[in-house]
Image (cartoon, grey):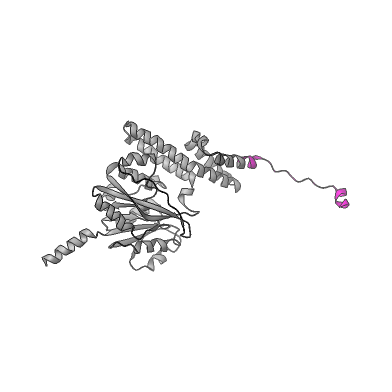
């Protein structure tokens, strides 16, 4: 009896339960891919929890076809609250947050746990991410050098992690952080990574653990929204810098990074709104550029600025009415 108990304790210690939380809103058509990628992990045991965030499509029906997947339902509260609800329903010693339109690599959990084993001091670990098209085909592999020190400072400069689908948290650490903050959506993943980097150690490895799906509805395509959200995140860091010159320099670099990343995207949005004669939306995008990007507009490649100017000129130019032909001309033909 004693030996059996000892064996059970050893198995439990070597194979911890890992929770995979999948929030879903209007993405039931991608959800089977996400669930399958979670269920086919090489590591066991796992639990998969899908959070139906008040989605108008058939999320519940999709989840019902998988007998080992738990479904949590709530009114629409946004991605941050959906992830937090999934965490509260989970039991795992470690937790991964997977978006419904993305996928995990088969060995993602195993690779993350291997990194934790090598770095027992880490509160969260980070792997690499590939990018795929809407049909699931491979696009490319953006890569950042794995961070080895000064995690908070380096994340202030540039988001090396890119997306929390490449992250695994210790349950105790995520619980202590208090979860994702709705006030920072849609940049809540960047905010919680900054918060985590301030409070605990992390470790990075080069295994590809997830695939980020690029499609027309990606939040990252909404430049004006992302400019506002990342600005809120960066503004919240200012009281924490405490006059530290290295952190202040990193903060300024990060501000430029986010402006340069989402400024051109916002210009594209502005052009699209002008093409569709959506004057209110175009005005909002223009105001966002002036407020958050300002002088950095002149640092963008000329093609982005030229596109915006061309569309503005075309919209302001009055269309020429065709000249009416005279009766004699018509008869002559």
Residue 329: within the magenta?
A: yes
Q: Residue 175, how many percent across, how many down?
A: 27, 50
Q: Residue at x 48, y 37 (%)?
A: 293
Q: Considering only vertical position in the picture, is 188 above or below 296?
A: below
Q: Residue furthest left?
A: 2
Which corner quadrant holds the N terminus?
bottom left
Residue drawn at point x = 58 percent, y = 44 percent: 279
Q: Is residue 90 above or below residue 121?
A: below
Q: Is residue 296 left or right of residue 240?
A: right
| Picture quadrant of residue 155 | top left
Q: Position of residue 40 (x, y in %)?
A: 35, 64
Q: Which residue is at the front of the view, 323 or 38? A: 38
Which is more toward the observer, 269 or 183?
269
Q: Seen in the image, is 26 located left or right of residue 272? A: left
- What residue do we see at 17% from left, 61% from top? 9
- Residue 94 position in % (x across, y down): 28, 55
Q: Is residue 77 visible?
A: no
Q: How many marks?
A: 0
Examine the image and state in which quarter residue 183 appears.
top left
Between 122 and 114, the one nearer to me in the picture: 114
Residue 209 percent coordinates (x, y): 36, 55
Segment colored magenta: 312-333
In this orientation, does residue 289 appear? yes
Q: Is residue 147 magenta?
A: no
């Amino acid at each position: 009896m004693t030996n059996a108990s000892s064996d059970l304790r050893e198995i439990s210690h070597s194979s911890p339960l890992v929770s995979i939380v999948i929030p879903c809103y209007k993405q039931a058509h991608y959800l089977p891919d996400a669930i399958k990628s979670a269920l086919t992990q090489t590591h066991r045991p796992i639990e998969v929890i899908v959070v139906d965030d008040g989605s108008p499509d058939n999320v519940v029906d999709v989840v019902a076809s998988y007998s080992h997947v738990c479904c949590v339902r709530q009114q629409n509260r946004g991605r941050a609250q959906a992830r937090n609800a999934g965490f509260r329903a989970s039991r795992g010693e470690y937790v991964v947050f997977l978006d419904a339109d993305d996928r995990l690599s088969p060995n993602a959990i195993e690779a993350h746990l291997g990194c934790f084993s090598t770095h027992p001091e880490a509160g969260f670990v980070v792997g690499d991410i590939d990018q795929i098209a809407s049909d699931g085909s491979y696009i490319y592999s953006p890569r950042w050098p794995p961070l080895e020190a000064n995690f908070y400072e380096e994340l202030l400069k540039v988001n090396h992690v890119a997306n929390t689908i490449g992250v695994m948290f210790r349950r105790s650490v995520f619980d202590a952080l208090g979860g994702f903050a709705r006030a920072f959506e849609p940049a809540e993943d960047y905010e919680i990574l900054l918060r985590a980097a301030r409070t605990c150690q992390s470790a990075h490895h080069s295994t590809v653990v997830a695939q980020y799906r690029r499609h027309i509805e990606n939040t990252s395509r909404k430049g004006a929204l992302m400019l506002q959200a990342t600005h809120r995140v960066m503004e919240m860091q200012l009281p924490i810098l405490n006059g530290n010159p290295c952190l202040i320099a990193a903060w300024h670099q990060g501000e430029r990074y986010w402006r340069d990343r989402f400024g051109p995207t916002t210009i594209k949005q502005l052009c699209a709104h002008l093409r569709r004669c959506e004057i209110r939306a175009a005005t909002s995008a223009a105001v966002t550029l002036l407020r958050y990007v300002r002088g950095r507009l002149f640092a963008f490649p000329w093609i982005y600025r030229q596109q915006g100017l061309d569309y503005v000129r075309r919209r302001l130019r009055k269309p020429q009415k065709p000249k009416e032909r005279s009766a004699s001309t018509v008869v002559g033909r």
